[in-house]
Image (cartoon, rainbow, N blue to C red):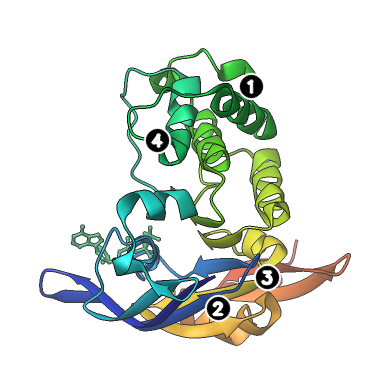
Amino acid sequence: MITATDVSVGYGGKLVVKSASLHAGPGEVIGLIGPNGSGKSTFLRTLYAALRPRAGLVTLDEQPIAALRGTELARRVAVVAQETPTDLPVSVADMVLLGRAPHRKALAAFTREDHQAVAAALSRVGARELADRRYSTLSGGEKQRVLVARTLAQQADHLLLDEPTNHLDIRYQHELLRMVGQLGVTTVVVLHDLNLAARYCTELVMLEDGRVVASGTPEEVLTPEMLLRVYGIHVEPVSVSGTLQLVFSMADEPAVPTP
Ligand SMILES: Nc1ncnc2c1ncn2[C@@H]1O[C@H](COP(=O)(O)OP(=O)(O)OP(=O)(O)O)[C@@H](O)[C@H]1O
């Protein structure tokens, strides 16, 4: 369970997250959405203590996150952030093995169980055949799958993902988010694609200029009025096999373009 209560975060003299709250219950997948620069990554980074809030509180299973030691945090929270190292001279398998580090006693060697967890995680994201490749030579989408495999190997019960689908082709976008939903792990995921958010998130939190302007189920948050106000875009919500999908048109075009 991850809870942020009235959190404000900023850089220098500027506040970019303003009294924002969020609650991710056990096994829930919370989508953090909002336009460019609205504060999504900053809010997410605060949830794993990479940034310290100026006001408010972040808790993990009701414990203040600031009170958790680094290794305990790493055991309990897995992160795929936007800024990831790309030029490390390591193999893919070693990159994923890094996810096992919080489970290892200081200076102990990795065990067979660690290597099995790495192989299983790579298989799960369809990247088993990449194990011996050098990480820095992978494509953007391959790297992203490997970073997700690292979080799986970490076996944390909380998962924080910053645009995990942005380099993935359409099939892997869906596979990844479906897999995240099936993990049963408490998840907060920053997503730009509102149709993916509608389909795979249990609840959404929408930011505008650092403030939470809507939160609730996808149907409650992704309304035409809200999307016009926050993104300046027209949307027609449609239900496809019981799933909310959004058809967009620019605000200066007719809502449903004529052929
Ligand atoms: N390290 C930083 N130093 C100063 N300002 C920053 C820093 N990181 C982000 N910002 C600013 O904070 C604001 C929020 O940025 P943030 O990356 O959290 O937004 P976002 O919603 O994730 O954006 P995007 O959708 O474009 O990824 C932006 O105005 C950005 O320029």
Q: In percent of the image, x 34 and y 34: which residue is there?
A: 106
Q: CA distance from mark 1 to mark 2?
A: 40 Å
Q: Residues within 10 Å of mark 4 (few under 14, many from 20)?
A: few
Q: Earlier in the sequence, mark 3 or mark 1?
A: 1
Read off the residue under disc 1: 128
Secondary structure of the residue carrying tag 3 is loop
Secondary structure of the residue carrying tag 1 is helix
Q: CA distance from mark 4 to mark 2?
A: 49 Å
95 is higher (above) or lower (below) than 99: above
Q: CA distance from mark 3 to mark 2?
A: 19 Å
Secondary structure of the residue carrying tag 2 is helix
Q: Earlier in the sequence, mark 4 or mark 1?
A: 4
Task: Tell me if 10 is positioned left or right of 236 in this view.
Answer: left
Rendering coords of residue 250 (x, y %): 55, 69
220 is higher (above) or lower (below) than 124: below
Q: Are marks 3 and 1 in contact (CB under 8 Å)?
A: no
Q: Residues within 10 Å of mark 1 (few under 14, many from 20)?
A: some
Of marks 4 and 2, the one in the foreground? 4
Read off the residue under disc 3: 202
Image quarter of the N terminus = bottom right
The kind of residue on which mark 3 rests is Thr
Quadrant of the rendered image containing residue 84? top left
Q: CA distance from mark 3 to mark 1?
A: 30 Å
Task: Tell me if 46 is positioned left or right of 205 in this view.
Answer: left
Q: Earlier in the sequence, mark 3 or mark 4?
A: 4
> Which circle marks residue 227 in the picture?
2
Rendering coords of residue 8 (x, y %): 28, 79
Q: Residue 17: in sight, yes or no?
A: no
Relative depth, front residue between 44 and 99: 99
The kind of residue on which mark 2 rests is Leu
Read off the residue under disc 4: 105
